[in-house]
Amino acid sequence: MNRVERDVAKAEEYYSRAILASNPSGPDGEVLCLYGKLIWETQKDGSRAKSYFERAVQVAPRDW
């Protein structure tokens, strides 16, 4: 695994942890959006990325 792949894997791990460790009112919209962007840019998984973007809008509609 090259350095970029390790960095992407580490980024995914950190985003997942941040989402799971979110405050009682739910995950942070910005974290969800950034994670969706990472998924799109690295895996081109549109449906998975879209689900994170949609969740970001649900939890923080005024931000988007």
Image: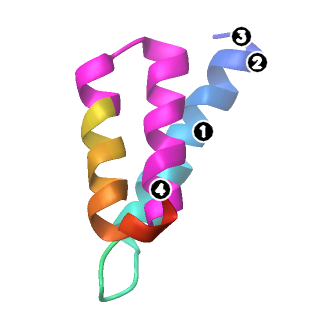
Identified by mark 3, the residue type is Asn
Callout 4–callout 2 Cβ contact below 8 Å:
no
Callout 3–callout 2 Cβ contact below 8 Å:
yes
- Label 1: few (<14), some (14–19) or many (≥20) C-alpha neighbours in 10 Å: few
Q: In the depicted view, which residue is nearer to us: 59 or 61?
A: 61
| Above or below, 7 relative to 53 | above
Q: Secondary structure at mark 1?
A: helix
In which quadrant of the rendered view does residue 51 lie?
Answer: top left
Residue position for label 2:
3
Tell me which secondary structure the magenta stretch mostly adopts: helix
- Label 2: few (<14), some (14–19) or many (≥20) C-alpha neighbours in 10 Å: few
Identified by mark 4, the residue type is Trp
Residue position for label 1:
10
Q: Which residue is pictured at 72% across the width and 18% down the height?
A: 4
**17 in the magenta segment:** no
Q: Position of residue 22 (x, y in %)?
A: 40, 76
Residue position for label 4:
64
